[in-house]
Structures are given as C-alpha cells and as structure tokens.
C-alpha cells in the first residue's frame, strides 16, 4: 500500500525574526520510505500565520512581537535593492 505523509520537520527562527519552515513529503510503501522531498518557506514578521502548522503558529506567536514586526518592517523599507 502506498501512503503520502506530509510533515513539518524543521522550524528555525533567524536573526530578523523570520521563521523558516521545512516540510517533508514522504512516499511510503508497506511502511518503508521509497521517495521523499523537501519544501521550504518563510513566515516573515507581520505575515498571517493562522493557516500554518500548530507548532509554527506557536513559534510565530512567541517571536513575532510588536517590536520584532516593527524592526523587520523598518529593515525592509530601508534595505537597498
């Protein structure tokens, strides 16, 4: 039997307060992984994280304080292209 399992397997908070999320997709056959891939995305301070994995939401709630969001937006506005 084939089964597709998607899970968040890595969550990192970087200096700017952005949360990097790695999602693993594993294709399993009879309990053994036969294929797998990874996808990464970033949740920046100020982004809506309400549809993220529960653990990602908890980390964003703890790290995306008003001060962090303001500092991130200021840094983005003053960044040179």
Image (cartoon, helix red, strand yellow):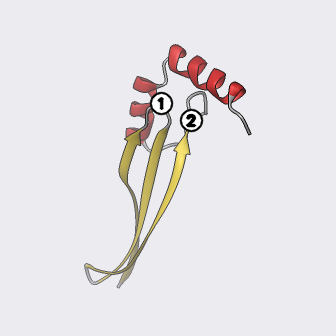
- How far apart are labels 1 and 2 at the CA level? 7 Å
Question: Residue 63, located in which quarter of the rendered image?
Answer: top left
> Which quarter of the rendering shows the N terminus?
bottom left
Of helix, strand and loop, which one carries label 2?
loop
The correct choice, above or below, for 37 with respect to 78 in the image is: below
Q: Earlier in the sequence, mark 1 or mark 2?
A: 1
- For label 1, the crowd category at 10 Å Cα-Cα, with few meaning under 14, some 14 to 19 and many 20 or more, is many
> Which quarter of the rendering shows the C terminus?
top right
The correct choice, above or below, for 52 with respect to 45 in the image is: below
Number of disc labels: 2
Residue sticking out furthest to the right: 81
Residue located 45% across and 48% down the image: 21
The correct choice, above or below, for 42 with respect to 5 in the image is: above
Residue located 39% across and 32% down the image: 59
The correct choice, above or below, for 54 with respect to 33 in the image is: above
- For label 2, the crowd category at 10 Å Cα-Cα, with few meaning under 14, some 14 to 19 and many 20 or more, is many
Residue located 38% across and 42% down the image: 12
- Kindly check if marks 1 and 2 are in contact, taking CB atoms under 8 A apart as contact: yes
Residue 73 location in percent, x, y? 64, 24
Residue located 27% across and 84% down the image: 30
Residue sticking out furthest to the front: 80
* Residue, disc 2: 44
Residue 57 location in percent, x, y? 45, 35
Of 42 and 31, which appears nearest the observer? 42
Would residue 62 be found to the left or right of residue 45 on screen? left
Would residue 45 be found to the left or right of residue 14 on screen? right
Would residue 20 be found to the left or right of residue 70 on screen? left
Residue 3 location in percent, x, y? 38, 76
Of 68 and 32, which appears nearest the observer? 68
Of helix, strand and loop, which one carries label 1?
loop
* Residue, disc 1: 17
């Amino acid at each position: 039997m084939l089964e597709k399992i998607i899970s968040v397997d890595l969550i990192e908070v970087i200096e700017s307060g952005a949360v990097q999320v790695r999602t693993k997709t594993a294709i399993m056959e009879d309990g053994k992984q036969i294929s797998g891939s990874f996808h990464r995305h970033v949740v920046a301070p100020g982004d809506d994280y309400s549809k993220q994995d529960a653990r990602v939401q908890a980390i964003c709630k703890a790290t995306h304080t008003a001060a962090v969001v303001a500092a991130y937006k200021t840094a983005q506005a003053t960044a040179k292209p």
